[in-house]
């Protein structure tokens, strides 16, 4: 379980996150929606230690993440698929995936894990020897997700997986997120595509300029008048 | 074989030898640049540090009945320590607080600190390093090649290939490539970025120590400023090859070595004495300017749109 309490994050004088609290229970898909600049990515970055918090607490399975070195967080079973994919462009697809397993002490299951990722994303198998930088955006998103899976995560943080992808690919990616949950993986999903996010999430939080303004069951928010007007364009 | 051909081949080998030394030093520049986008101007001075360690430890090692080249062990240890200390004490704090310009100036400051520190301790004069190798020349017909020349070339080649394999296939090598490309993503993979950077400095400085052994075997003199010109030429080699690229540093180093050796030997004859061999350094830097004009990213470099 991931529990965030009264989290504040600043970049210099600019307060990006102003005291948010949220919970992600095991096995849930929880979505964090909101406009550009609302603080969604900052929240994820703070969870995995890429950005320091100013105050508040983040506890994951009993571990205080704010006191955990950023490079140790993946060993607690938390993977982060960052916004903009951040694949290693000058490495091959397979090398990228192997980097995902970097934190595992036992590297003997590497071959089996690769096959598992290729089952999710058959296209990556064809392209395993290709440099990741030469892939399309959708394929890079698959690499980034596959790379996260290689670390045997219990929880995956996903930042804008639909960004820049065709509607067909977005559907494919979201189907896989649903499958991952069925496999027992907890997902915290940050999305600007609120409609897609709410359609697969169990619960959701709406973030506005650093504060949580609404929360509840995703299906309720999907039909909420204010959410529909602000985020669903209807 | 005519005498001219023999002379040409021995010049070629002498160029390969000094080129291997440049390549070893250029690798240090290029690896550090690759990982933190910093030109470590103090890197040339690591060679000087290594050379002084050789000068100081060889007599004791020989007295103990060991071959002189065993001094490479303390030289590597000291250079690695100096490299890591410079990174941790000077570059890391500046990197976290300042920008790339402050880091660059800090690197120049570190270079001056090492040079003047050496001068304060050892004085400004040249001092002699005891003979390192006692190798016989190897004769191919009338062509005689000094043993240390061949050794330098072979050793340089082995180290370069080994380094390339290390970076390509080992876990730590892959971590270095990951950090060099995307630090945030590397952290998310569980890579300790700071220790990976320290490892890069350690390898670069260790190579500088090997370079100082090979250099002192050929030119057995040390002085506080010896690393400045050597480092500058190796830097040119790294830029020529494409800074950030390991094969590029090797190619650049060998190319600079060959150009230097061949211009020294032939430029006087070719130009009828107008340009003398004293211009060989000028020619090396002229090459840098031409390369920067024609292909700014270097022979093996990638266009990244970001230049120092």
Image: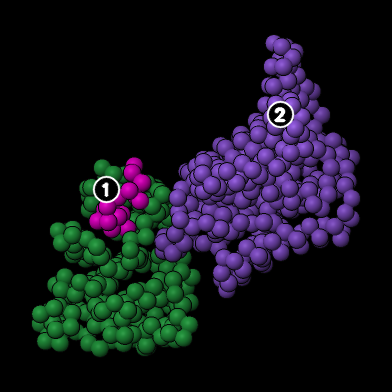
Q: Are marks 1 and 2 in contact (CB under 8 Å)?
A: no
| Closer to the eye: label 1 or 2 | 2
Q: Please report the bounds of the magenta region as a residue range.
A: A129-144
**Which circle marks residue B271 in the picture?**
2
Kindly tell me whether residue A60 is visible in this rendering: no
Q: Quadrant of the N terminus of chain B?
A: top right
Q: Quadrant of the C terminus of chain B?
A: bottom right
Q: Colour of chain B?
A: purple
Q: Quadrant of residue B195?
A: bottom right
- Is residue B203 placed above or below B99 in the rendered structure? above
Residue name at image x 39 percent, y 73 percent:
A45
Q: Secondary structure at mark 2?
A: loop
CA distance separating discs 1 and 2: 59 Å
**Same chain check for tags 1 and 2:** no
- Tell me the subunit letter for badge 2: B
Residue name at image x 89 percent, y 50 percent:
B125
User: Which chain is the one coloured green?
Assistant: A
Determine if the magenta segment contains residue B180: no
- Is residue B30 placed above or below A151 in the rendered structure? above
Q: Which residue is mark 1?
A: A124
In-image side of B203 versus A85 (left or right): right
């Amino acid at each position: 379980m991931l529990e965030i309490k009264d989290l504040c994050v600043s970049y210099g004088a600019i307060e990006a996150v102003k005291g948010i609290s949220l919970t992600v229970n095991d096995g849930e898909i929880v979505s964090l929606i909101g406009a550009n600049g609302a603080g969604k990515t900052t929240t994820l970055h703070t969870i995995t230690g890429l950005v320091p918090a100013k105050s508040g607490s983040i506890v994951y399975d009993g571990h205080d993440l704010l006191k955990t070195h950023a490079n140790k967080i993946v060993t607690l079973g938390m993977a982060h698929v960052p916004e903009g994919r951040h694949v290693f462009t000058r490495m091959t697809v397979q090398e990228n995936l192997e980097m995902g397993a970097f934190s595992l002490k036992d590297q003997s299951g590497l071959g089996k894990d690769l096959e598992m990722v290729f089952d999710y994303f058959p296209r990556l198998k064809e392209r395993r020897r290709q440099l990741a930088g030469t892939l399309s955006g959708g394929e890079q998103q698959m690499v980034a997700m596959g790379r996260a899976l290689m670390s045997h995560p219990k929880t995956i943080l996903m930042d804008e997986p639909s960004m820049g992808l065709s509607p067909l690919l977005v559907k494919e990616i979201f189907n896989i997120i649903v499958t991952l949950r069925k496999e027992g993986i907890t997902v915290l999903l940050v999305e600007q595509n609120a409609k897609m996010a709410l359609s697969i999430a169990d619960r959701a939080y709406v973030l506005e300029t650093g504060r949580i303004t609404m929360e509840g069951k995703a299906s309720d928010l999907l039909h909420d008048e204010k959410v529909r007007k602000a985020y669903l364009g209807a | 074989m005519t005498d001219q051909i023999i002379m040409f081949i021995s010049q070629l080998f002498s160029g390969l030898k000094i080129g291997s030394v440049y390549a070893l030093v250029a690798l240090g520049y290029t690896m550090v640049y690759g990982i933190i986008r910093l030109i470590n101007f103090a890197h040339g001075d690591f060679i000087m540090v290594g050379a002084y360690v050789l000068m100081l430890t060889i007599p004791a090692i020989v007295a103990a009945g060991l071959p002189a080249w065993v001094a490479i062990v303390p030289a590597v240890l000291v250079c690695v320590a100096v490299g890591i200390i410079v990174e941790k004490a000077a570059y890391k704090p500046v990197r976290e607080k300042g920008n790339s310009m402050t880091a660059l100036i800090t690197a120049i400051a570190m270079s001056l600190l090492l040079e003047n520190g050496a001068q304060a301790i050892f004085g400004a004069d040249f001092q002699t390093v005891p003979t390192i190798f006692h190798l016989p020349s190897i004769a191919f017909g009338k062509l005689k090649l000094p043993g240390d020349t061949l050794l330098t070339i072979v050793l340089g080649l082995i180290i370069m290939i080994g380094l390339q394999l290390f970076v390509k296939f080992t876990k730590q090598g892959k971590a270095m490539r990951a950090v060099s490309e995307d630090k945030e993503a590397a952290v998310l993979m569980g890579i300790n970025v700071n220790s990976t950077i320290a490892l890069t400095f350690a390898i670069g400085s260790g190579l500088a120590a090997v370079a100082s052994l090979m250099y002192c075997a050929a030119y057995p003199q040390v002085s506080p400023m010896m690393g400045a010109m050597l480092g500058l030429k190796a830097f040119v080699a790294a830029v020529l090859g494409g800074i950030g690229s390991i094969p590029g540093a090797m190619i650049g180093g060998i190319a600079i070595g060959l150009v230097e050796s061949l211009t020294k030997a032939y430029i006087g004859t070719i130009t009828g004495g107008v340009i003398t061999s004293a211009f060989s350094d000028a020619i090396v830097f002229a090459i840098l300017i031409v390369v920067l004009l024609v292909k700014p990213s270097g022979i093996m470099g990638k266009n990244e749109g970001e230049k120092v």
